[in-house]
Amino acid sequence: MWFSEFTPEALNDRPKNHIGALLDIKFTEVGGNFIKATMPVDERTHQPAGILHGGASVVLAETLGSIASYMCVDPEKYIAVGLEVNANHLRPVKNGLVTGICTPLHIGAKTHVWEIKIYTDKNKMSCVSRLTVAILPKPL
């Protein structure tokens, strides 16, 4: 499914000037049709009530789906950009680490659709998200 071989280490070695690095999102596993990443639940990702901010969950989901689309295309010819994202926040998370698992729902020539499920460190689903990504020709 992937355009070339990727490892979590290579994905984590990307430039650090992006929101995923600010929130300490780390890729942990690349499978045949999925990728996983973690994000800490701490003062960087809390909302004022002291629980995981829904927007931080969406950042994790969009990071996973966007990178998954990038992994499916020739980066010399195409870029992958988020088109639409939605999320259902199912339970609050106060601390620890959440893990996102991203799997494909549709891999087309011009759009990709990903399902991202986010779990607490007690393996309870805290969020489910769907991301649609547009595949565009790389600008000259």
Image (cartoon, rainbow, N blue to C red):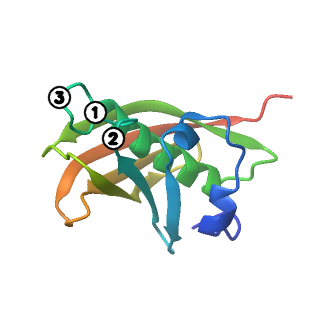
Residues tagged 3 and 1 counted as in contact (Cβ below 8 A): no
The image quadrant that residue 135 belongs to is top right
Kind of residue at disc 3: Ala
- What's the distance in space between the residues labelled 3 and 1, CA to CA? 9 Å
Looking at the image, is 113 positioned above or below residue 105? above
Q: Quadrant of the N terminus?
A: bottom right
- Identify the residue at horizontal 19%, vertical 57% (top origin): 125
Left or right of residue 29, residue 98 in this image: left
Left or right of residue 113, residue 19 in this image: right
- What's the distance in space between the residues labelled 2 and 3, CA to CA? 15 Å
User: Mark number for residue 34?
Assistant: none
* Percent of width and height locating residue 78: 72, 42
Q: Name the residue under label 2.
A: 57
- Identify the residue at horizontal 65%, vertical 66% (top origin): 9
Residue density around tag 1, few if under 14, some if 14–19, many if 20 or more, within 10 Å: many
Q: Mark 1 points at which residue?
A: 53
Closest to the observer: 50 or 105? 50
Residues tagged 1 and 2 counted as in contact (Cβ below 8 A): yes
Q: Residue furthest left?
A: 91
Residues tagged 2 and 3 counted as in contact (Cβ below 8 A): no
Q: Mark 3 points at which residue?
A: 49
Residue density around tag 2, few if under 14, some if 14–19, many if 20 or more, within 10 Å: many
Kind of residue at disc 2: Ser
* Percent of width and height locating residue 108: 52, 49
